[in-house]
Amino acid sequence: MAAVDLSAVPEKSSYDVVIIGGAIMGSSTAWFLSNNPDFDGSVLVIERDPTYENSSTAHTNSCMRQQFSTDLNVRISQFAADFVKNLRQHMGGDDRVPELSIRSFGYMYLADTEDFADVLRESQAVQRAAGAATKLMTPDEIKRDYPFYNVDDIVMGSINLVDEGFWDATAVFDWWRRSSRERGVEYVSNEVVTMTKDASGQRIESVTLKSGEIIACGQVVNASGPRASRTAQMAGIDVPVEPRKRYSWIFSAEQPLDRDLPLTIDPSGVHVRENGGGTYQCGGHSDIDPAVAYDDFAMDHNIWQEHVWPVLATRIPQFEAIKVTSEWGGHYAYNTFDHNAIMGPHTEIGNFIFLNGFSGHGLQQSPAMGRGTAEWLTYGEYRSLDMRPFNYERIVRNEPIIEKAVI
């Protein structure tokens, strides 16, 4: 990710929109605001670490899929696919913007029980109704098309080879930031430490920065990833988002596969995908999955030895002889309520806007989520996709959205 030198001190003391967090959600929102001719306000993005070294954005699989179990999540990813494939057009035809594509090796969900197979069948019906190209596969069909899999315990597979796979999220993120700044969005390297409400207690009046400046704000967007709860608490608000650790490994195989490896979701929860050049990327986490400290990115090497590698070698016997070349720990911004996005205004503090809790599928949802949040900030309503089911209000009503395809 291209680092940029940022001032710590904002140029002004008041902004129409203050976005807390400048990673992919905050930057998507900033860009869509700057791209909307109906929005003429001022925007400040406050990012505590402009290197983004430990952000969820930097620790991603950088893949997208349409294999979700709810229609809205499918359509959100379909917009992401269109946005990526037509990035230059979406960004006004700027010939500096790269032409991107999606390396559509697909996601392969493997079901080892009839109950899980039924979930895949139900989800495929939702996906196909939304126009996705998902197909179900018998074990024999899987073995025919991907002979490297061990499918002895598999009942069914589900795959979509259209607009599912790797995309250059770094390029999109970098251009959102660059274009936003060129259009007048201000980014600063700083941190919000407190918020002040007005006399009614129903609006955020200002935010105070770590360096001491007090910034008046019209609306505040909480786009602070795994730190969403800490940001909300400054406003006296609880949001059910916490950092959960997820581990990733890049490895090379002594005997590389003879074709692209779909992003394979093993029934164990371990996932692995094509990385190119005879290398592969896989991910997993501990069965015990507690919240962790915001700065805890330490690796647990036992997970690789005792869980991940045995699963890989069993599912794909050619992966018995592999060598790890890099590894890292990252954080999901994990929504403990229902693993889905939390958006829209707080039910009482109306100018506090959520953009939180993506639970691992935020990167692919960032185009639609930034667009939707920008619409809400501009019009007080969603005008493209109706994102109201994700609004914070459902937390208050205790009405979770059940999404069955969470990795």
Image (cartoon, rainbow, N blue to C red):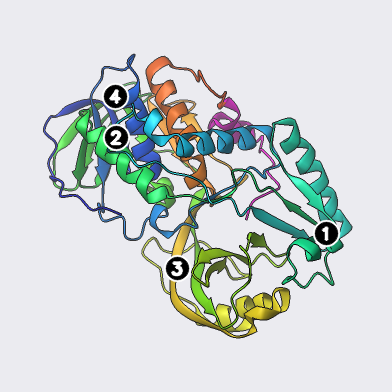
Q: In the rendering, at what x and y percent does residue 38 appear? A: 34, 14
Residue tagged 1: 141
Residue in the foreground of this view, choosing between 233 and 110: 110
Quadrant showing the N terminus: bottom left
Q: Magenta span covers which residues?
A: 388-407
Tell me which numbered mark, 4 or 1, is placed earlier along the sequence.
1
Q: Quadrant of residue 51?
A: bottom left
Discs 3/2, front: 2
Spatial separation of the CA atoms under disc 1 and disc 2: 43 Å
The residue mark sitting in front, 4 or 1, is 1
Q: Which mark is residue 329?
A: 3
Kindly state the secondary structure of the residue where label 2 is placed. Answer: loop
Residue situated furthest front in the rendering: 258
Q: Is residue 23 visible?
A: no
Q: How many marks?
A: 4
Q: Residue at x 14, y 39 (%)?
A: 213
Q: CA distance from mark 4 to mark 2?
A: 46 Å
